[in-house]
Image (cartoon, rainbow, N blue to C red):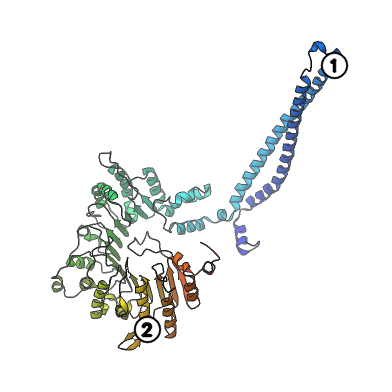
Amino acid sequence: MAEGSPVEGGMNNLRNPVYVQELEAVIAEIPEKQSLASLLRQEYDNIRKDLEALTDERAHVETRVAPDSLLTARFRECINAALSDLDASIRAQSERLQPTEERLREVEKDLKELRERRQLLNSRVSPVQVLPEEILVKIWNFADAVPRPIHSTQLPFILSWVNKRWREILTRTPTLWRFIQASPNMSPGLLQLQVQRSAPCLLKILFSFRSARPRRTSTNGGVDRLLFVMTDLIKCADRWQSFHLGESSWSNWEQVAELSLYSERLQQLLCSVHVPHLQHFCAWWQGLDCLGELFEHGAPSLAQMQLSGLSVFPNLHLFRRLTSLELIQPDYDERLTPTVFRSLLAQCPTLTHLGLDGNIFHSDPDFPSLHPYPLPLTSLTSLKLSVLNYSRVDGFNIPELFQIFIAPRLESLQLLFLSRPACEGLMQVLEKSPMACGSESLFRLHIHAGEGRIGLGHSLSSRMLVQFPNIQHLWINAPQEDGQELLEALALHMGDGEPQRLCPSLDTVTLDIGFDQVDEDGGDYIRNFVATRQVIGLPITTLRFYPEMDAYAARELLAWCHEIVKVEVLPIRDIEFECCEMSEKPIPAPLNLDRLHGCGRF
């Protein structure tokens, strides 16, 4: 930073002038002490060398070359005189050595203290130390919002190790302690410390079982440890703002069996707890049996739920005020009937997001006669449908789904593990009732092929895109053939022998370039799509590619696109069902030209 710059000047205004003056004096004194210490060290070393030489010489003189009877009296007198002189010199040098050594130690001690003082004063006037406390807290709060690996040391503890000032600020800032990551194995003392320091803030809690290992040698499998931790958490349940039970990654069968040891006691604890401020509840339970009723006293503030492995029937009282709901059913045989599912949705008049993972309800041939008109979810703007469930089985019937509800004002539609039969079923619904998925209100469409090709073909691709004329952002996560068919339909669709311009508002396309998108032709179909949209007067403004490493491997394609449109890259992105609070939000980054041309590595 240039001297005298506004930022530097601002930092100088924050520094304590007393510390600055003292630091200048210390810095000025250190060279003098260093010079004196160097001189004393040299003098001390010289005295040591002289003593060693005198001692060696005395030993040499004292050595007899012949028996005394053979030596003259005069020779013996000369030897004794020489020894006497050497002893005198040794005594003189020894007398000089001790005070010189003491003086050297004193000066070196002073020099060490000056250097330590300089380090302390430097820290007190450094930019990070002179920042006002409120700015440091804001920075830390932003850092704490970034998702970190599960079971990593929590940020407040890491920051408190830096220095005394930071530790003092942290201990009196409860907002920095409001995220609590608990597990049956954690130290009760550590949990109590976090609960104490976070008061009176509302809490975000992740109760993790990933590292839990029930003790098979104990009489209850280690449930006592679960009880200790949950008891401390329940004491502050009136401050729970969000509660995450488990993580959205599947365990192996051994862990599933171990988790089942906790289920009965865990359900009892969570059933009776009172949670007046709970807004977000995420349950990823992976035991052998579903969890039953939770929060029997209700959760009046609950707005977002994501449920997997939780029995829906005894928990219908939790759905009444939801704005976001995701139902992820693993392998439990507890599907809803269409009537119950419709009643469940009817309890959520303000629902804005709905995610359904696989076939969560049984088919009922009598349902259309009982409910001839689907339930309109007029507040629903985001719908996420996974044709296969989390175990990649049990595809649901899309026409049957839209007999239960429709979303006339839908803005975002995500289709995961899409297959051609599912797509044909969706077209069957939309061509009969376009408002089932918003039609003209939809501006974002995400097509995910799962592990294989969808097999859309040009005709089915065109039929689908025709239903959503106002799409602004199309996200394609599919093999090259599917992506090519979709983009070719967007480039120029032939309807009744005449070219039709599909999706005239489309301005952003996101492509999974790691899905063999550019292996065979170097992405020529992407170039053709971009160029053709330019020619017909419907230019694309932004192309996004991911994952990042694969994107930069397609240098020629990115360089060509960069000349025409805005190019952005995304890190690897898992678009399956993840907790919206705990998963990292992908942030598009501008194209790095140095990296594109091989001038930089990341």
The numbered disc on residue 75 is: 1
Residue drawn at (20%, 62%), measured in percent from left and top?
335
- Image position of 393 with respect to 539: above or below: above
Marks 1 and 2, how far apart at CA: 122 Å
Is 562 in front, or is 148?
562
Tell which circle, 1 or 2, labels the residue nearer the N-terminal end: 1
Question: What secondary structure is marked by label 2?
Answer: loop
Question: What secondary structure is marked by label 1?
Answer: helix
Question: Horizontal and vertical percent for residue 569?
Answer: 45, 68
Question: Horizontal and vertical percent for residue 204?
Answer: 36, 55
Is 270 in front, or is 108?
108
In the displayed structure image, the side of residue 520 where residue 117 appears, left or right: right
Residue linked to disc 2: 492
Whether residue 387 is visible, yes or no, is: yes
In the displayed structure image, the side of residue 473 where residue 37 appears, left or right: right
In the orientation shown, which residue stands out farthest toward the front?
A: 520
Whether residue 377 is visible, yes or no, is: no
What's the amino acid at mark 2? Leu
Question: Horizontal and vertical percent for residue 187?
Answer: 37, 43
How crowded is the residue under tag 1: few (<14 C-alpha within 10 Å), some, or many (20+)? Answer: few
